[in-house]
Image (cartoon, coloured by chain):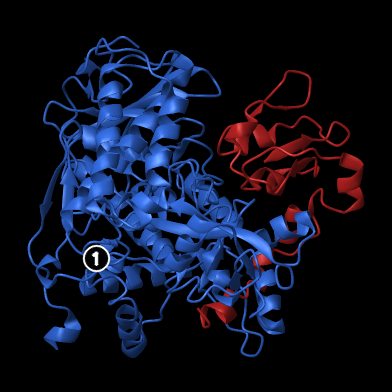
Chain colours: A blue, B red
Amino acid sequence: MAQDTGRSSPSAAVELDADVLVLGGGPAGAWAAVAAARAGATVVLADKGFCGTSGATAPSGTSVWYVPPDETRRRAAIESRRALGGHLADDRWSRRVLDATFDGMNELAERGYPFPRDEETGSSIRVSLQGPEYMRLMRKLAKSAGVRILDHSPALELLVGPDGAAAGARGVRRQKGDDWTVRAGAVVIATGGCAFLSRALGTNVLTGDGHLMAAEIGAEFSGMEFSNAYGLSPAFSSVTKSAFYKWATFTDEAGDAIPGAASQGGRSVIARALEKGPVFGRLDKADESIRRAMRASQPNFFLPFDRRGLDPFNDRFAITLRLEGTVRGTGGLRIVDDSCATTVPGLYAAGDAATRELICGGFTGGGSHNAAWAISSGRWAGAGAAEFSRGRARAGDLQAAGGAALADGGGAAFDPAAAIHAVQAQTFSFQTNYFRHPDRLTLALERLDEQWRTMRRGVPASREDVVRAREAAAMTAVARWMYRSGLARDETRGMHRREDRPGTDESLRRHLFTSGLDEVQTRFGGALAQTEEVAA
Amino acid sequence: MIELVSEERCTGCNICVAICPTNVFDAVPASIPTIARQSDCQTCFMCEAYCPEDALYVAPDADETVAVDEPRLVARDLLGSYRSALGWTKTGRPRALSDAMHKLVKSF
């Protein structure tokens, strides 16, 4: 891989031309691909794993922010999260998302998703989705819309046209051992958030790859300080389902209840307790009807317990907090218009890869907004990309834009596994990430910056490791944006907690933008518009 | 993590190779797939859901490997238990039809 930066796009085993290339095959990517195809575009969707099982949604179940178009209910839905999100959400975007989600869920019903029915009225209930069923259907819808799906095809870098606009990508087909190149009129980044290989359920494909590729062609991020979400799971297990711990009692090793510990509003107490020793949970506050509903709704939640021979309602089990990073945090690629365009022409973003601040501000309590955002932003980004592609001349040489871990700068080869371990040490740590302090953030940044410089100069020792090496580079880049933003937001707001600044500073009720790789820049956007509530 | 590809049950259809999102399995010509990259397993249980023969077992332990004993797993009815819970068997009823999240969401 000894190539210079600014390389011409190389030839590959699979070479395709498309109007729209979608990177990522979770819900946002699948909705984007379907929307682009329906707008008349030829579409290729490349997924690192398998479109249908990849991402945080497929193996889990999620509630969905589905609110019928009733003004009182919609206003209540918007208001309910306003303070939690640190007053950074935008009412107009929230209304758009409620409309698009309502529409999208109804479409799923028409396409055969088996929604449950109300036992008394018989009416269809559309407030949640079972991941395996949902994503199996989304793959089917994408295929029937004519989308060409490339599975097990991680993208390594974007291609840019002479005009600087996104114009495709190249990557590897890891089960074939060869390369792919797609030249496209526009690109949708739907590669998910970044959870740093924490093994939180379904997140290990979510390593910030799209963030890195987008940054390499100049894209800007927003809200990267809102990146320290941690999910509750049994200590031995991957199954993060924090919502169900609403019914848990948390105890210490001696069996004494931990004061203030709770899934909602007391998760930081759990983190503090975990720093001192093991913490145990037992879902003993769930009554019989709740227990039945839990088992009916989330079979995956019970798998770890059933297989271990544990009864989560009666037995105490050790719990842990797994980092969910920007998967459940709200930072991501900055969105500049209603079509989910980013700051780079031809580059669109959807789902967790895009900032979710527009509807959540600086905090996401549960999965319902994430699911709604994936449906809505996916549809808009797909349609927007199709539109951009239609008006675009396709000529000129394309340049491959990837740098770190791809372009040999003459430095020493590095070991991706060691690099990943080093980033995890800086991001899993409650002391650095959960409870932030400028001294600790600065120390972490010194280490991450040094690691970044190594990756800019060197490539992995083995070409086999190139995907892992790019993941390591992406995680390093994301961590640097997180902590530079965390330093810049000199207050506590949303999920971003600064120990030295426990209060909120009204002058910082703004979005915080981040960009750059070798040098990271941060800047605050303009003051946010008054909310409808205040304006009314 | 994935711990078992049952030699007795597996027909070598390689669906697991195709659908595993973290590319844990390798197809083997004229044989059954191998667990080639166990440490990449994210314990998402999707392979079990898609295995038509209930030949796979994902232990609940996400961070370390554990020994499993196939006859014991069969005796405990664990092989195929997730697919069955999803209603993804031939005679199954989709789990989504009995989704009761709306009863829990109100409580969130």
Q: Is residue A103 visible?
A: yes
Residue at point 64%, 63% (across, down): A253
* Label 1 environment density (alpha carbons within 10 Å; few <14, some 14–19, many ≥20): many
User: In the drawing, does residue A20 fall left or right of residue A265?
Assistant: left
The answer to whether residue A337 is above or below residue A481 is: below
User: In the drawing, does residue A472 fall left or right of residue A49?
Assistant: left
User: In the drawing, does residue A532 fall left or right of residue A138?
Assistant: left
Q: How many marks?
A: 1
The answer to whether residue A47 is above or below residue A200 is: above
Q: Nearer the viewer, residue A239 or A31?
A: A239
Quarter of image, res A20: top left
Residue at point 24%, 68% (across, down): A502
Residue at point 24%, 48% (across, down): A439
Quarter of image, res B54: top right
- Label 1: chain? A
Q: Is residue A326 visible?
A: no
Q: Nearer the viewer, residue A277 or A357?
A: A277
Quarter of the image with the C terminus of chain A is: bottom left
Reading the image, the residue beneath label 1 is A492
User: In the drawing, does residue A26 fall left or right of residue A526?
Assistant: right
Q: What percent of the width, then of the height, locates residue A178?
A: 47, 17
The answer to whether residue A68 is above or below residue A244 is: below
Quarter of the image with the N terminus of chain A is: top left
Amino acid beneath label 1: Thr
Q: Secondary structure at mark 1?
A: loop
Q: What percent of the width, then of the height, locates residue B83?
A: 74, 53
Q: Nearer the viewer, residue A429 or A73?
A: A429
Q: What percent of the width, then of the height, locates residue A312?
A: 70, 67
Q: What percent of the width, then of the height, locates residue A173?
A: 48, 24
Q: Nearer the viewer, residue A139 or A241?
A: A241
